Image (spheres, rainbow, N blue to C red):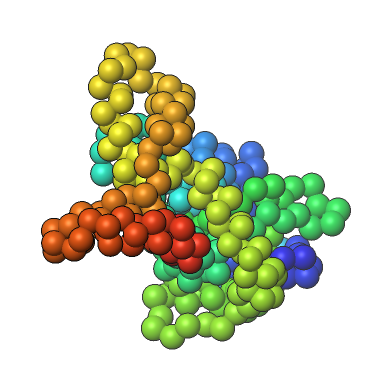
Amino acid sequence: MHITYAAELDRDSLQQGDVLLRTPSIDALLTTVHPHYTKEDYRYLMVLTQTCDLVRRIGSGDAKRCKARYISVAAVRPLDRVISREIEKYQRSSLERDHRLCDATHREKVEQFLARLLNNNEEEFFYLHPHQYAGAQAGLTEPHCGFLTLSIAIKSELHYATCLDAKILQLDEGFQHKLGWLVGKMYSRVGTADWVPDVCTEDDFKKRIDTVLNEACAWIDPTVKKLLVRRLKTVPLEEQTTERVLAECEQVKLTAPKKKDLLVDRLGEILAEQNVDAAIVKRVKNLVKSDSDIAEYVAK
């Protein structure tokens, strides 16, 4: 059981944060009132309305209604859509945008974004980890995110039962409050369990982030990018497929100067500009080149 979800699924009522499957009835409803939400990558829906407004009290028997006249739901899309959108902010050239490359100097910013996202501290999204309840016929088989800004209203009096029948996941109470905070744009952070240390170690969390980002695009060092652009000028435009570009990139990496070598060469140039004796310059360069600590610093 992941920290995000309730131990059991309440089949009798809707609650804030419930994840709804795109059942035929849900699809028929969307086709009628919100056809845009039938897009293929809007794979699920997430209930945004507060739980207290979804409790059915008004009326009697099967005719009981909830306080909310409308049920607000948001589109749930694959995690890779969120990551791709974030990476696009840092893809400055058509080469990067067309062939899923990104300057490695921006990787740390995307890593920080992804860490906030997985811990549900990004205002516009709510991360949903793969999960399926025992005995249930459906669940999430891959990471998704609720796109909180992509919300629509469904009339509760007509469609409450349809939504309830489509319910496949339910948030833990603490994460229901977190979702409410995100939706309401509150100014205080709701305290819920984070991945570290409640789910995994810091190293495991870093590995998970690395895996997601490495699958999202190829991270390319600025020096390599310059050499790649130069190399692609010899390749006909019609042959510059993503597969060819990535292959050329790997070849460039084999011959590109290492950061440490660039550092040593620049250091030598600076010392020479300061009229330092050539023998001393050579000695300093050799000392820097052989220093293991410097190699570690440059690698970071």
Give the percent coordinates (x, y) of residue 222: 31, 45
Give the percent coordinates (x, y) of residue 10: 75, 67
Give the percent coordinates (x, y) of residue 189: 47, 83
Is residue 69 visible to us here?
no
State the quadrant of the C terminus.
bottom left
State the quadrant of the N terminus.
bottom right
Q: Residue at x 62, y 70 (%)?
A: 202
The residue most toward the right is: 135
Is residue 211 visible to us here?
yes
Taking 136 as reference, is 201 left or right? left
Query: Which is nearer the eye, 5 or 25?
Result: 5
Q: Residue at x 51, y 50 (%)?
A: 213
Give the percent coordinates (x, y) of residue 191: 56, 83
Taking 258 as reference, is 74 left or right? right
Reply above or below: 101 against 21: above
Q: Quadrant of residue 134?
A: bottom right
Q: Residue at x 23, y 56 (%)?
A: 278
Q: Residue at x 31, y 55 (%)?
A: 282
Query: Which is nearer the eye, 10 or 146?
Result: 146
Q: Quadrant of residue 210?
A: bottom right
Query: Which is nearer the eye, 282 or 214?
Result: 282
